[in-house]
Structure formats: C-alpha cells, structure tokens
Amino acid sequence: MAHNDAFARRVRLDRLYRNGSGGLLVVPLDHPISGAPIIHSGRPGGLDGLVGELAAGGADAVVLHKGALRRVQPRRLRDLSLIVHLSAGTGLSADPDAKVLVCTVEEALRLGADAVSVHVNAGSRTEPRQLADLAAVAGDCDRWGVPLLAMVYARGPAIADGRAAHLVSHAAAIAAELGADLVKTAMPRAVADLAALTGDCPIPVLAAGGDARDSGESLRHLADAMRAGAGGIAAGRLVFNAPEPAAMVRRLSALVHDRAPAHSR
C-alpha cells in the first residue's frame, strides 16, 4: 500500500510539473473567504472565464476552495492542475491571522484535486492549532498519495517584519519538517538572502506574488527570486487585480518557464 501511495503522489506531482521546465506557476484564487474579491463588476465570464485565461496564459495550477469549483467548467482543468485549499479564515475575526480546516484531503480527491494546500501563520495566536492541522493534513496526504503545498508566513502580533530573512527561512523549514512537498512564502528582500533561502530549504520554495498596485516592483522581485533558485511563483492578487490578468499570467509564465527577465512580455 505504501508503494502504491508513493506512486500516486509521483503521478500527481508530474501533473503539476506538466510544463517540463522544472518550475511552477501557481495562481491562488482562495481570497474571497478572507475578504478580497477576485471577480470585479463587469468582468466577462466570471470565475470560469478567469480560470480559462490562467490556463491559456501558461499557469500550471490554480488554487480554489471546494465551493468555487461549482462555478468552473471541468474543461478548464484539462491543461491546468487543480489544488484544493483546505484552510480558511476571515479578516472579520478577532484574530485575522487564525486559520481553520474547512475541507479534507478525501473531499479534495472526490473533487478531482491533483494536490491540496494549507495555510499556516507562524507567530499567530493560534499557531499551535495551525501547526497541528498542517501535520494532520500531511499525514492524510501520505495516506492518499497527494502532494501538499504549505503556505507558511511569519505573521502575528509580535512580528514586525514577516519578510525578515531568518523568519522566512523558519517558515519554509516548518513546511519541510512537517511533510509538505512545496512551500509558498513571502520572500526576503535581499538577493543574497533569497539565494540562502532557496539553497537551504529541502523542498521547492514558491515566491509569493505581491500586489498589482506596484506590479513593476513585484515582477522585479520575482525575477530576482527565480534567478536565486526559487522553485516557482505563486501569485494571486498580482494576477486577478491586474488590468489584464491574461497578460500578467503570460509575463509570470515567462519568468518561471523561460527564466526571462522581469520586463519580458
């Protein structure tokens, strides 16, 4: 059984890396629960249309909550892997850094997931529960042969700078030590710190994308991260808040799959 589960995990990882470049471009669209709308008034096609643009633009995977899949046509996922997000929290909470599990690995598999993801805010008031949830999901992923993306950030009342190099390295280490296959995190600012992070972490590090309000700076930083050895990019707001999401996906795809400079189109 263990051998079969390991084989299933490799099959699903191969689906994630279908592009063959060795890098991953993941577009998280799990933001509505936290309070950030991803579909703006007047946008044609709604969520289904946006997911279609991601696939056409060269994204490797999309992250969605289970309910959102009801608004996406299955054909959109022929050339795009599905990562089902298992945790959630809102900005309305007394602790906006809190996350709880809202889906299981088994549910995600029934929905056709190629992988699952879990969010952890290290340093938050509910860190112990979030760590326990990540560990439990990692165990279920081992059981079912499912790749696990851990989104781990240094966030909490005592953390002044979540992009400090030592805190980012700690966040990445948490993901690796608890059994994740991939980790998404905010990247340190200095190029030397980027290289140290990606060199020390035993699993691929996906650079968090940043905000579309300063897309030029975000793209430059992501290009630095890719040159420093990042395993890819996981960009949500940078894509769905862009004036032309399809064009932004193409630019990010060039950074990840062609290792192009930030100004590439």
Image (tube, rainbow, N blue to C red):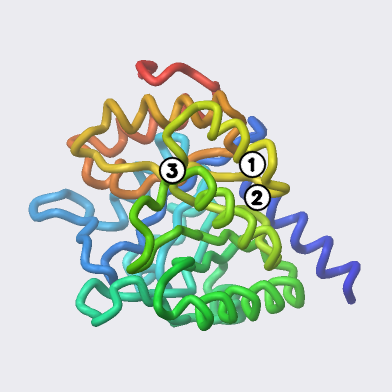
Q: Residue 160 is drawn in which quadrant? A: bottom left
| Front residue of 109 and 123 | 123
Q: Residues within 10 Å of mark 3 (few under 14, many from 20)?
A: many
Q: Residue 136 is drawn in which quadrant? A: bottom right
Q: Residue 196 is drawn in which quadrant? A: top right
Q: Residues within 10 Å of mark 1 (few under 14, many from 20)?
A: some
Residue drawn at (66%, 34%) of the image: 22
**Residue 264 % position (x, y):** 39, 17
| Front residue of 85 and 68 | 85
Label annotation for residue 15: 2
Label annotation for residue 55: 3
| SS type, badge 3 | helix
Q: Mark 2 or 3 closer to N-term?
A: 2
Q: Are marks 2 and 1 in contact (CB under 8 Å)?
A: yes
- Is residue 57 at least partly visible in the picture? yes
Amino acid carrying label 2: it is Arg
Q: Mark 1 or 3 closer to N-term?
A: 1
| Front residue of 196 and 232 | 196
Label annotation for residue 53: none
Amino acid carrying label 3: it is Ala
Write down the residue under mark 1.
18
**Residue 48 % position (x, y):** 31, 56
